[in-house]
Amino acid sequence: MLTIGITAAVESASWTAWRELDANVSPRTYTDEVEAGGVAALLLPAQDAGRERIGALLDHLDGLILSGGSDLDPSTYGADADPRTTGYRIERDAFEIALTRAALDRELPVLGICRGMQLLNVACGGTLEQQVPVPEIHLHTPGTFADHRVRLEPGMLAARAVSREQVSVRSHHHQGLGNLGEGVVASGWSEPDGLIEAIELPARGFAVGTLWHAEEEHGSPVVAALCAAARERSVVA
């Protein structure tokens, strides 16, 4: 059976009688959309052992989703922290950057979502903008998705995945991309502010990032495209 790995956030969480414990967490929408694509989902917690044996871990995967979550540590892209940059976990950043680079080297299908798109860019040597100029377009209320439109570059992977060049999306972020990493190309922009909302690595097969939460769309065409790419790669292999 084909398997898509999904990175898990490291957060302080509470459930039943337990309060404020470190936990590996992931919204069910990620696994639901992967399973809807006919592929098994496997959560990938940040771990030193996994980082030391990335190759063995990737041997079990046919694709990878870099999920959303807290900000990245600015030191990962050579910057000092803005006071509004918070919640970063060094162990998660280190694990996911190593995982992403190894997955790209294998041309494993990769989809970065929100934080995952930012991490994809950083893993390729790019930087982040720690506070976007018009944040209310992308995050007007913490814990609530903001709705806006995105314009996609015709003919590129993101536009082909959603089968159109304009799409309504759900966002929840206050950061964006700075300098694009090596091989990274912008393929989508938010309206009306023109923030980069989609990126691709044309030389790496299926490697796409969406700053919007593609997993929040029931029957997500972007996640379905990742599953299809994993299936195609498996057949070729």
Image (spheres, grey):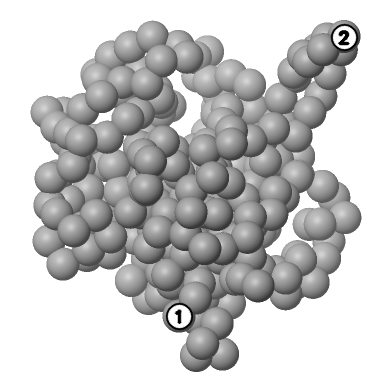
Cα distance in 3D space between marks 1 and 2: 45 Å
Is tag 1's residue or tag 2's residue first in the polypeptide sequence? 2
Residue 60, horizontal then vertical, whole percent: 72, 70
Query: Which residue is found at the position 48% from the left and 54% from the top?
Result: 36
Query: Which residue is found at the position 27% from the left and 35% from the top?
Result: 169
Q: Which residue is mark 2?
A: 17
Specify the amino acid type for callout 2. Ala
Specify the amino acid type for callout 1. Glu
Question: Is residue 107 shown above or below 135?
Answer: below
Q: For this rendering, which residue is in front, 77 or 197?
A: 197
Question: 10 Å neighbourhood of mark 1: few (<14), some, or many (≥20)?
Answer: few
- What secondary structure is marked by label 1? helix
Residue 48, horizontal then vertical, whole percent: 85, 50
The quadrant of the image that shows the N terminus is bottom right
Q: Which residue is mark 1?
A: 232
Residue 210, horizontal then vertical, whole percent: 36, 46
The quadrant of the image that shows the C terminus is bottom right
Q: For this rendering, which residue is in front, 52 or 163?
A: 163
